[in-house]
Amino acid sequence: MNPWLVGAAVVAVVLWSRRGAAVNPRRGDSIFDYAVQTAQAAGVDPAVFLGIIEVESAWKPNATNLVGPDGARGGAFGLTQMTLRTAQALRPGITGEELLDPRTNLDVAGQLLAENARRISPLWPDVAAAWNSGRSFDTAPERTRYEYVPKVLAAANRYAMNLDLDLGDQEGNV
């Protein structure tokens, strides 16, 4: 495990806690519960998937990004900000409008999570890096490693602490 990553995640957690950022666990919310189930079915710790959703869309099911690199890939849609090109590789013919449906978005995201967990790793840093770049943490671009992953891990830690999720003994939990 990269010692820098562990240190960055700890710093991120401290900074977030000083800001007073609180996780709304959303227990009992059907979409939240569905996200937890989707992550478990994909073989990924739910806390990291919830962290990805928080960082990507702040839990806004209608979040859309049609500019920049995401726009070049057909736009990014919904809770997980799934790009249309990636979604269509998993489900040919799916539309951006369909990705705005929370359950559809989470279903397609679950497919990608499962594929990445098998291809790369189910460890938290790898799951986050793969979501952002398609690569493991160690091979991801610097921006992914030093900006995106620490944000996701900080959010994941808050979910794990607030929800009493079983973290197991995975390397990468801080």
Image: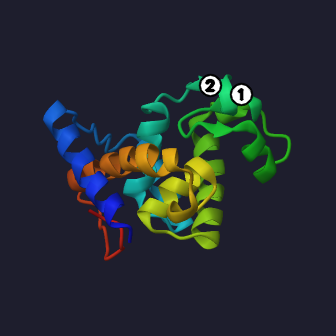
Q: Is residue 73 above or below residue 122?
A: above
Image coords of residue 27 (percent x, y): 31, 45
Which residue is at the front of the view, 134 or 56?
134
Q: Is residue 115 left or right of residue 73?
A: left
The answer to whether the residue labelled 1 contacts the one labelled 2, judged by CB atoms less than 8 Å apart, is: yes
Q: Is residue 63 left or right of residue 157?
A: right
Identity of the residue drawn at 38% across and 40% down: 29
Mark 1 = which residue?
A: 71
Residue beneath the point at 57% across and 67% down: 117
Q: Secondary structure at mark 2?
A: strand
Where residue 111 sits in the image (x, y, percent)? Answer: 65, 57
Q: Residues within 10 Å of mark 1 (few under 14, many from 20)?
A: some
Q: Is residue 46 left or right of residue 167?
A: right
Residue 160, picture quadrant: bottom left
Inspect the image, locate mark 2, and give the three-letter code of the amino acid beneath it.
Answer: Asn
Q: Nearer the viewer, residue 103 or 50?
A: 50
**Which residue corresponds to the image point at 48% horizontal and 32% vertical from the top-left?**
57
Q: Is residue 100 above or below residue 45?
A: above
Looking at the image, tell me whether mark 1 or mark 2 is earlier in sequence order.
Answer: 2
Q: Which mark is residue 65?
A: 2
- Counting every numbered tag in the picture gives 2
Q: How many neighbours does mark 2 have within 10 angstroms: few (below 14), some (14-19), or many (20 or more)?
A: some
Q: Quadrant of the C terminus?
A: bottom left
Pinpoint residue 6: horizontal percent, then vertical percent. 30, 61
Picture quadrant where residue 23 is located? top left
Element class at badge 1: helix
Displayed quadrant of residue 98: top right
